[in-house]
Amino acid sequence: MREIIFIEENNQFQGKNHKISFSLFLFIIIIVSLLVISYICSNIVLMKLGYQSIDLEQKREQLLAENYQLEYSVGCLSSLTRIEKIASQELGMSRPEKIEFIAMLPANINSAMVASQPSEEEQGSNYLEAGNFLREFASLQVFKNQ
């Protein structure tokens, strides 16, 4: 009888041992499969980011080329020779034969516009008094208001 009890206990122990080893095996399989799935997912994400990076670089190159083309167009459209051609042909403008400049000074020059008197130290040096210069300049016939 002792042998039967021992054999039954041994069978129960082996059954429990089988259950423990089977559950451990399943646990390891699940962990390994989760690791493999996470590795595959991370590689998929990295591949997508790589493709996005390549697409963005190509778009950047296209935009730079378009920018250079637009800068060239702006340079061509705003060139002085083109503007002069349009002014003469389309608008009927021409260059003047003689260029004359007329400078006008205000009729009454107030003291805020005239420089102050130089100090005694500066009078001995070669400074030009701005007030007298402006008065003489304004008295010229070209600058008289008519």
Image (spheres, grey):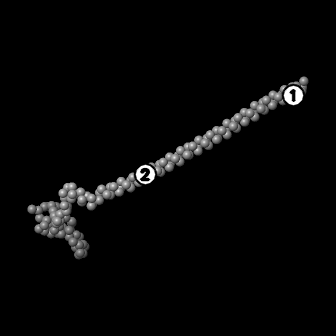
Task: State the residue lying farthest toward the left.
Answer: 146
Quadrant of the drawing holding the N terminus: top right
Please give the name of the residue rendered at 18% of the width and 57% of the height, measured from the top-left corner: 92
Q: Is residue 4 left or right of residue 15?
A: right
Q: Is there a contact, CB below 8 Å, between mark 1 and mark 2? A: no
- Density class for disc 1 (Cα within 10 Å; few <14, some 14-19, many ≥20) is few
Counting labels gives 2
Q: Is residue 42 left or right of residue 53?
A: right
Residue 22 at what x, y percent from top left?
A: 74, 33
Residue 142 at what x, y percent from top left?
A: 13, 67
Asked if 33 appears above or below 71 in the picture, the reply is: above
| Label number found at residue 134 | none
Please give the name of the residue rendered at 30% of the width and 56% of the height, measured from the top-left corner: 77
Residue 57 at what x, y percent from top left?
A: 47, 51
Which amino acid type is shown beneath numbered disc 2?
Gln
Which of the 4 image quadrants contains residue 135?
Answer: bottom left
Residue 139 at what x, y percent from top left?
A: 12, 67
Residue at mark 1 to residue at mark 2: CA–CA distance: 83 Å
Between residue 105 and residue 95, name the one nearer to us.
Answer: 95
The answer to whether residue 120 is visible is: no
Where is mark 2, residue-wise?
Answer: 62
| Label located before the other in sequence (1 or 2) | 1
Where is mark 1, residue-wise?
Answer: 6
Please give the name of the residue rendered at 84% of the width and 26% of the height, measured from the top-left corner: 8
Which amino acid type is shown beneath numbered disc 1?
Phe
Please give the name of the residue rendered at 79% of the width and 29% of the height, measured from the top-left corner: 15
Looking at the rendered structure, the secondary structure element under dot 1 is helix
The answer to whether residue 44 is visible is: yes
Looking at the rendered structure, the secondary structure element under dot 2 is helix
Q: Is residue 45 left or right of residue 74?
A: right
